[in-house]
Image (cartoon, rainbow, N blue to C red):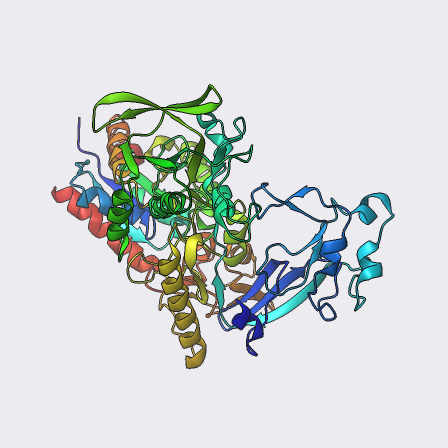
């Protein structure tokens, strides 16, 4: 067993406040996650995700608003089409697609944020460290 | 409403629907469908002769909650502005059978025009205030209270029509058979604070239930029972009114009734009195269901038209609950009233004033301040593939002569284009590739140490 390193890209208007709420509510969640704020989950380019793995992240979490709630009207729809394709590319290149996950977390879902993070951490923990996969 | 109708700087487009909103703050172009009302608004004097003489008289009035009747050519309600009637095609004898035209013959100014068709008006505006209001919860959804089955179970809005001096009974509180009720039960939180329908508190029902109880006490000798979960009488003078109604002899029972069953010509309200800790069964003559507030049925469509977001309960989302209560995610579009969330009249008036002031201030300034985080384009790198143009939620990007141009006023900086661009021609200021990369590397280093 090892401690996986996970980078979460969270959108400014739903998921980042959701993470904030988890903190304010003193909900415990896995310390393996580091959150990076983007304005919209649609900002997360495939290249950024790949480079995050390249730099040594064992898992990448992309967090956006639920459908219909996106502050940027339809930004999350773009994310929703992009990430599944990217997962297929990862699988094709020999990287477990489970390492990349897209989840919707609203600003009121502090508990859900903690749950998603914990669950994802445990999923990634079952996989070998990324260095071994990319080596 | 009359003074709004007469104001020289205010133009009311009633019986109309917004079909398309284009442009951006300061330069909105709005297409409005002006529905055919089959009455020429410029000629009609609002005398009401057509309504009086229309032969189709047995149409349940929407405004009276089905308690009263209206005609096929009608004013939606007595104070409607502008005072011009409309013809309801579904019920008009001429439209249904091809014969009648009584209103046309009788109209002293010749305003009735059966050939009228929908028109599209293009309006250019600088700012928009959305005040589309709410829908009242449909009481027939709570089947245990028999709203559709028992004739003396009324919704709060129906009862409101009953006590109105210009309503179907001229203000007399009567049962369906014409008797005056001896006892009335008022059930709070119908469709509110209930995980089967809406979880939120509709906020106005406690106070209007107290008002209705007061009106019953005022005009009849009936006993009034209020079934409540919690009394929420926050607001200036509200708690005092609650006390006054208590002193008038209204009985308050803490508990949401389980069901209503008919018993010997009356209605039996079965509930638990949580304060006494026992079950109660109270026979009454009339039941009023205090219906909650819901987002308009077409709120999703309106949100899409105006670029608004909605909160989890379906109401329109303000920019910030404390610091931007009337602003929205779309620059130049404001919201006020119950479309933003359930609220009473004083709060609605206050919010409407705030929205009007915010909109005026914006137009008076003549300039807009933009968020600094917007997309920038490197023309040298752009291949003109157009992927970003399709992806942009705000139509802020445009293909011009083989490369993309950014409309800086329309761009909100979401960065979806940057996420899409294959040739790295788009830089999203404050969220550039370099910045995100550096942040990601730093984050990983922190995790490494931990």
Q: Quadrant of the C terminus of chain A?
A: top left
Quarter of the rendering containing residue B118? bottom right
Residue B287: horizontal and vertical position, in percent? 43, 33
User: Is residue B110 visible to us here?
Assistant: yes
Disc tally is 0
Residue A46: horizontal and vertical position, in percent? 41, 46
Q: Residue furthest right?
A: B99
Quarter of the rendering containing residue B329? bottom left
Residue B270 vs residue B130, the one in the foreground = B270
Quick check: B221 left or right of B130?
Answer: left
Residue visible at 75% across and 65% down in the picture: B40
Quick check: A87 left or right of B450?
Answer: right
Q: Residue furthest left?
A: B449
Residue B351 vs residue B182, the one in the foreground = B182
Residue A12 vs residue A46, the one in the foreground = A12
User: Is residue B415 visible to us here?
Assistant: no
**Relative to B319, does residue B135 appear above or below in the rendering?**
above
Residue visible at 74% across and 60% down in the picture: B49
Residue B335: horizontal and vertical position, in percent? 43, 60
Residue B117: horizontal and vertical position, in percent? 77, 58
**Relative to B249, does residue B118 appear above or below in the rendering?**
below
Residue visible at 54% across and 26% down in the picture: B149
Quick check: B444 left or right of B395?
Answer: left
Residue A72 vs residue B130, the one in the foreground = B130
**Relative to B392, does residue B198 appear above or below in the rendering?**
above
């Amino acid at each position: 067993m090892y401690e996986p390193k996970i980078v979460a890209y969270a959108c400014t208007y739903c998921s980042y406040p959701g993470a904030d709420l988890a903190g304010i509510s003193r909900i415990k969640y896995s310390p393996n996650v580091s959150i990076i704020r983007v304005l919209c989950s649609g900002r997360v380019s495939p290249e950024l995700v790949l480079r995050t793995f390249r730099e040594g992240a064992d898992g990448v979490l992309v967090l956006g608003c639920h459908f219909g709630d996106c502050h940027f009207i339809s930004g999350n729809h773009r994310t929703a089409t992009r990430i599944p394709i990217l997962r297929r590319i990862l699988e094709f290149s020999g990287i477990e697609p489970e390492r990349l996950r897209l989840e919707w977390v609203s600003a009121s879902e502090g508990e859900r944020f903690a749950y998603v993070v914990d669950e994802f951490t445990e999923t990634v923990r079952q996989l070998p460290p990324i260095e071994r996969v990319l080596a | 409403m009359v003074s709004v109708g007469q104001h020289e700087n205010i133009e009311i487009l009633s019986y109309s629907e917004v079909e398309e909103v284009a442009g951006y703050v300061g330069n909105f172009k709005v297409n409005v469908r002006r529905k055919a009302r089959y009455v020429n608004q410029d000629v009609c004097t609002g005398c009401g002769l057509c309504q009086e003489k229309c032969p189709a008289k047995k149409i349940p009035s929407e405004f009276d909650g089905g308690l009263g009747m209206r005609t096929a050519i009608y004013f939606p309600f007595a104070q409607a502005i502008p005072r011009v009637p409309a013809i309801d095609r579904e019920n008009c004898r001429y439209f249904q059978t091809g014969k009648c035209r009584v209103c046309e013959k009788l109209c002293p100014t010749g305003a009735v025009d059966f050939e009228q068709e929908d028109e599209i008006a293009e309006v250019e505006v600088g700012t928009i205030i959305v005040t589309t209001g709410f829908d009242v919860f449909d009481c027939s959804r709570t089947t245990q209270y028999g709203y559709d089955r028992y004739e003396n179970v009324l919704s709060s809005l129906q009862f409101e029509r009953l006590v109105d001096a210009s309503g179907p009974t001229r203000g007399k509180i009567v049962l369906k058979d014409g008797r005056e009720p001896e006892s009335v039960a008022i059930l709070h939180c119908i469709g509110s604070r209930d995980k089967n329908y809406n979880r939120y508190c509709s906020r106005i029902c406690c106070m209007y239930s107290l008002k209705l109880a007061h009106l019953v006490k005022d005009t009849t000798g009936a006993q009034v029972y209020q079934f409540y979960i919690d009394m929420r009488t926050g607001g200036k003078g509200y708690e005092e009114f609650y006390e006054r109604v208590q002193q008038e002899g209204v009985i308050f029972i803490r508990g949401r009734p389980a069901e209503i069953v008919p018993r010997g010509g009356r209605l039996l309200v079965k509930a638990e009195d949580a304060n006494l800790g026992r079950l109660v069964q109270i026979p009454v003559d009339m039941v009023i269901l205090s219906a909650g507030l819901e987002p308009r049925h077409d709120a999703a469509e309106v949100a899409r038209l105006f670029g608004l977001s909605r909160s989890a309960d379906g109401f329109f989302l303000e920019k910030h609950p404390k610091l931007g209560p009337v602003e929205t995610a779309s620059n130049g579009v404001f919201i006020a009233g119950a479309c933003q969330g359930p609220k009473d009249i004083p709060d609605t008036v206050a919010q409407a004033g705030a929205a009007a002031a915010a909109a005026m201030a914006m137009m008076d300034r003549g300039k807009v301040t933009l968020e600094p985080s917007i997309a920038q384009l490197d023309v040298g790198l752009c291949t003109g593939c157009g992927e970003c143009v399709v992806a942009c939620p705000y139509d802020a990007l445009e293909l011009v002569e083989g490369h993309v141009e950014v409309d800086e006023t329309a761009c909100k900086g979401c960065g979806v284009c940057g996420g899409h661009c294959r040739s790295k021609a788009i830089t999203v200021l404050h969220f550039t590739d370099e910045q995100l990369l550096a942040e990601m590397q730093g984050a990983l280093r922190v995790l490494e140490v931990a």
